Amino acid sequence: MHPNPPERGHDDAALLTAAWVAILAPLVAIALKLPTGGWLLVGMVFSFPIWLTGYAAVVVPAAVGMLRRRGSLRRPGHRTRAVIWSWLTSIGVLIVGLTVVDGGDTSESVASTLGLMLGSTGTDSPVNDVSAVIAMVAAIPWLGGLLALLVEWMVSLARRRAEAPRVAPPVVGQ
């Protein structure tokens, strides 16, 4: 252990917070959706491998690139953008979890968590229409932030690999 460990500055705290929020936000979004669970949640159960792959697409860059001491997204050229993309995808997924409209077996059970909180459910509710539009708009930063975070992580890995010094000189034919 190093006798004088480096102090974590404000930038590290912002990066670590963004990483943890990005990891936990999809789980919180599912928890937000649970009160109005219907066919959408049933569909999520059957398409679980797809959702698990999407969740891994957030966790891997956050955990490997941001939480590790020498993570590639901790470098100054990538740090700020990684924080922005993490927050963007996290806020987007939370809004989608709160506002996505889910249907049940009857027209009265059609609702979003936002509609349930406002006491307005059913197919004829204008709150559901507004909620569905909000969910569609929020899906753009959610998926865009996720894609941008993945691209940022891949670019940071490629730059890191390109900058790595060679360990041994190339072998020359004799």
Image: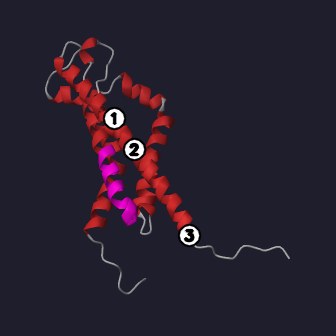
Q: Taking 139 as reference, is 153 left or right?
A: right
* Nearer-N-terminus badge (3/2): 2
Which of 132 and 33 lies nearest the eye of the viewer?
132
Residue situated in front as seen by the camera: 5 or 166: 166
Q: Residue at x 31, y 66 (%)?
A: 12
Secondary structure of residue under mark 1: helix
Amino acid on which the number 2 mark rests in the picture: Leu
Kindly identify which residue carries mark 2. Answer: 146
Work out which quarter of the rendered image holds the C terminus and state it: bottom right
Left-right relation of 47 to 98: right
Q: Are marks 1 and 3 in contact (CB under 8 Å)?
A: no
Return the residue found at the far right.
174
Question: Which quadrant holds the N terminus?
Answer: bottom left
Disc 1 or 2, which lies upstream in sequence? 1
For numbered disc 3, what is the local secondary structure? loop
Q: Which residue is mark 1?
A: 140
- For disc 3, the neighbor class at 10 Å (few under 14, some 14 to 19, many from 20) is few
The answer to which image quadrant residue 66 occupies is: bottom left
Q: Which residue is mark 3?
A: 164
Q: Earlier in the sequence, mark 1 or mark 3?
A: 1
Q: Position of residue 11 (x, y in %)?
A: 28, 66
User: Which amino acid type is shown beneath numbered disc 1?
Assistant: Ile
Residue at 43% x, 26% y is 43
Give the magenta-colored segment's residue range: 74-89
User: Would residue 39 be seen by someone viewing this image from the given angle?
Assistant: yes
